[in-house]
């Protein structure tokens, strides 16, 4: 079985993330969307909330499952018998960082990384930008699933200029 892991914080999941998950689901028998538990970082949504959201928005994929993980990605992939990590690249600036991680993963365990260029429609979308726009009451509907849009509206009250 060809199994891949799509790791990330997904705080929140965007249409760019979903594009990578969708395309990965067509390449691999199984895709695990792995939500990183980073205790040194306070997210807008808890890990449990992110898992719930991701499970709902990926529910139509029979070969995608969503889990949380912490620690080294190479250890998680070994435990899950995943042969490859899939990473989306939005811009050249992403490549520098992602290449270093990929090379470290190969050095640690032989784990391969597949770099998937983001669909140009989503190349500028970042979770941090989505949160900032939502915080100020902007329309984020083109960038996130409807569920995420609702959750952002519930969580963030638009800041109004004085």
Image (cartoon, rainbow, N blue to C red):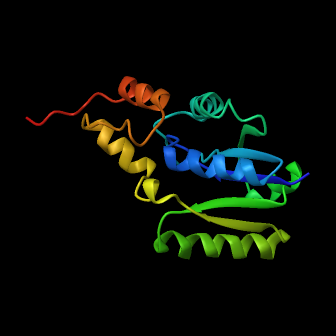
Residue reaching furthest to the left: 162
Q: Nearer the viewer, residue 32 or 110?
A: 32
Q: Could you tell me if residue 21 is visible in this image?
A: yes
Question: Number of marks in the image?
Answer: 0
Q: Quadrant of residue 132?
A: top left
- Locate residue 91 relative to residue 130 in the image: left or right: right
The residue that appears at 45% across and 39% down in the rendered structure is 144
Decide which of 55, 106 is in the foreground and name it.
Answer: 55
User: Relative to the observer, which residue lies in front, 54 or 108?
Assistant: 54
Residue occupying the point 51% across, 58% down: 119
Q: Residue at x 84, y 55 (%)?
A: 82
Q: Looking at the image, which residue sits at the far right?
A: 1
Left or right, 162 with respect to 160, comes to left
**The C terminus is located in which quarter?**
top left
Q: Position of residue 139 (x, y in %)?
A: 30, 36
Q: Is residue 110 above or below residue 139?
A: below
Among the 4 quarters of the image, the one containing residue 88: bottom right
Where is residue 52 shown, x and y percent of the image?
Answer: 62, 28
Q: Position of residue 64 (x, y in %)?
A: 74, 39
Q: Image quadrant of residue 155?
A: top left
Q: Is residue 40 visible?
A: no
Front-lying residue, 32 or 161: 32
Relative to 71, is 43 above or below? above
């Amino acid at each position: 079985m060809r199994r891949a892991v799509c790791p990330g914080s997904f705080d929140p999941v965007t249409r760019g993330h979903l594009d990578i998950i969708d395309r990965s689901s067509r390449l691999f028998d199984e895709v695990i969307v792995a939500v990183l538990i980073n205790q040194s970082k306070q997210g807008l949504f808890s890990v449990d909330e992110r898992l719930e959201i991701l499970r709902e928005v990926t529910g139509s994929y029979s070969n995608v499952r969503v889990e949380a993980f912490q620690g080294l990605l190479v250890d998680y992939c070994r435990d899950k018998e995943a042969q490859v990590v899939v990473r989306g690249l939005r811009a050249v600036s992403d490549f520098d960082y992602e290449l270093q991680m990929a090379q470290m993963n190969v050095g640690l365990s032989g784990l391969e990384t597949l770099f998937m260029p983001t669909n140009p429609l989503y190349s500028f979308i970042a979770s941090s930008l989505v949160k900032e726009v939502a915080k100020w009451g902007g329309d984020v509907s083109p960038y996130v699933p409807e569920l995420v849009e609702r959750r952002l509206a519930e969580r963030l009250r638009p800041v109004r200029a004085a």
